[in-house]
Image (tube, grey):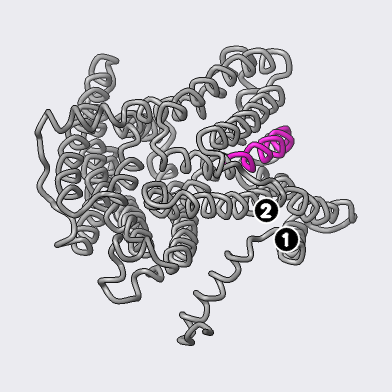
Amino acid sequence: MASGADSGPREQQRAGDLLDTPLAGPAAIQGSALRVGGYAIGVLLSVGSSALLFRHLGVADAGRFVTALSLVTIAGGLSDLGLTTIALRELSVRDQASRERFVRSLLGLRTVLTGAGVVSVVMFTLVAGYPRELVAGTGLAGVGLVILNIQGTLATGLMVELRLGWVTVAELLRQVVTVISIVGLVVAGAELLPFLAVAIPSSFAALALTALLIRGDMPFTPSFDRTEWATLLRDVLPFAAASVLGIIYFRVAIVLLSLVSTTKQTGYFSVSFRMLEVLVVIPQLLVSGAFPIFSRAARDDHARLAYGVQRTFEASLVLGVGVGLALILGAPLAIEVIAGPDFDPSIGILRIQAIALIAVFVNVAWVYALLSLRRNREILLLSLLGVTLNVASVAIFGSLYGARGAAWATTIVDVVQTALVGVCLARVNPMLRPSLAVLPRVALAGLAAGALALVPGIPTAALVALAGATYIALAVLLRAVPEETIADVRSLMRRRAGNPPPP
C-alpha cells in the first residue's frame, strides 16, 4: 500500500530530497492513484455500514444521526479555512526550523478553531430545542472531528514527503474502525448516542498511526501564540474565504432549487448532486499529490512549474473525460442502483452534470497552480464570481426548467469558471499559459468511444466497460496521454518488479 516514496531510503523520503528529484513525479502519480483507490474502498465501506445502520436505527433516529453529522461536517468545513492545503504549500518550501514553528502554530490554531466550531453547533442544537440525546451526540461527534483535524494536520508531513501510501492506510484504518464499531453496536442493539461517538475511536486510530509514522519529523506540541496566529491568518485569509465560498458554491444550487421549484424537481436533482458530491473528491485527491512539487517549483524554478502544471492539466483532462464518459453512459444503471425507477428523470440530469465534472478535473489542476504561486486573492475573486454566477443562473433556469435547468446552469458556470481560471493563470505568468493542443485528441477519443452507445442491445455495464477500454486505447494511440506520464508509470512498474530503469 505504500507509495514509491515509502519504499526507498528514509533520507530520500524527505521533502528536501525527493521534491527536487526526478523521482517526485512517479511518487506523486502512484501515491495519488493509491489515495483514489483507498477513497473508493472507503466509499464502499461507508455504503455498506450505512445500510446496516439506517435499518437498525429506523427513520426517526436515522434522521437525527444524519442531522448531527451534518452539523459537525459544516463546523469542520467552515473551521478548516483551507489550512490543510496551505500547510502543504508551506511545508514544501520552509526549512526545518521554520517548519516546526509553523506546524506548532497550525496545530494550536486548528484545535481552537475546530473546538469553537463544535461548541457553536452544540449551542445551536440547544437553542433549536433538539432532544438531549442529539445535543450530546453532536458534542461527541465534534470531539471526533477535533481529533481528526489534528491527525490531518500531522498527515501533511507525510503528504509533503509524498508518502501518500501511508496517508491512504491511515484513511482506510479510520474507515475500517468505523465499520467495525457500527457493526458491533448494531449487534449489541445500541441506541443512537453510541453511534455518534464512533468518530472518536476511528479518528484516534488514524491519529495514532500517523503520529507513529512522523515521530521525529513533526512536532506534536501545539503553540497558542496569538501573534503567530495573526500572521498565519493574514496570509491565508483570502484563500480561507475562497474555501468557504467553495463549500457554499457546491451546495447553493440544491438550496436555491428547493426555493424556486417543486419538491419533486429538487428530489430529482438531489440524487445527481449526491453522486457528484462523491466524485468531485477524486480530482482533489489526484492533484493534491502533485501540489508539494508545484509549491517547490513555484519557489525555485518556474520553468519546472510550467512543465508540471501542463502535464498535470493534460492528465487531468484525460481522466476527467474518461470519468465523465463513464458517468454519461452508465447513468441509467447508476440511478437504478442508487435511487430506483422512481428517479428516472435524474438520468438526464446526471448526464448533464457529468460535463461539469470534466471541468472540475481541469479546474482543480489550475487552481492548485495559482495557490502554489500564492495568488490567494485571484482565487478569492474567481470564487466570488463563481458563486454569484451560480446563484443567478440557478435561480433563473431552475425556476423556469426545474432540475434540468439547474443542472445546465451549474454546468455552464463550472465550464466558464474553469476557462477563467486558465486565463488568470496565463496572466499571472505567461510561462504558465495552458496549451490546449491535447484537447482535440482527447475529444476524438471520447467521441469515438461514446459512439458505442449507438450500437443496440449492449447492456449498460458492458457498454461502460467496452467504451472505457476503447477510450483508454485511443487516448494512448492518439498521444493524448502525456508521454512523461506513461514513462513514469512504466518506471514505477519496473521498480515494483525489481528491475532497474534502463540507462
Residue 294: x %, y % from top left: 43, 50
Tell me where residue 267 sits by quadrant.
top right
Q: Dot 2: what SS?
A: helix
Is any atom of residue 192 visible in this view? yes
Three-letter amino acid code at the position of disc 2:
Gly
Please give left or right for residue 220 compared with residue 73 in the image.
left
Report, in whole angstroms, how far the alpha carbon at label 1 lies from the one at label 2: 10 Å
Q: Which mark is residue 1?
A: none
Q: Which residues are magenta?
A: 344-360
Tell me where residue 408 sits by quadrant.
top right
- Residue at 59% from the left image edge and 36% from the top image edge: 422
Three-letter amino acid code at the position of disc 1:
Ala
Q: Which residue is mark 1?
A: 475
Residue 76: x %, y % from top left: 31, 34
In the rendered image, the vertical position of residue 426 relative to residue 170, given as above or below: above
Q: Which residue is mark 2?
A: 322
Residue 134: x %, y % from top left: 27, 29
Please give left or right for residue 327 compared with residue 498 in the image.
right
Residue 305 drawn in magenta: no
In the rendered image, the vertical position of residue 438 relative to residue 271, given as above or below: below
Please give left or right for residue 156 compared with residue 397 in the image.
left
Is any atom of residue 183 visible in this view? no
Residue 264: x %, y % from top left: 65, 23
Of mark 1 and mark 2, the one earlier in the sequence is: 2
- Residue at 62% from the left image edge and 36% from the top image edge: 272
Classed neighbour count for the residue bearing mark 2: other residues with Cα under 10 Å, few (<14), some (14–19), many (≥20): many
Q: Nearer the viewer, residue 426 or 397?
A: 426
Q: Nearer the viewer, residue 181 or 154?
A: 154
Q: Are marks 1 and 2 in contact (CB under 8 Å)?
A: yes
Q: Nearer the viewer, residue 95 or 252?
A: 95
In the rendered image, the vertical position of residue 385 relative to residue 317, given as above or below: above
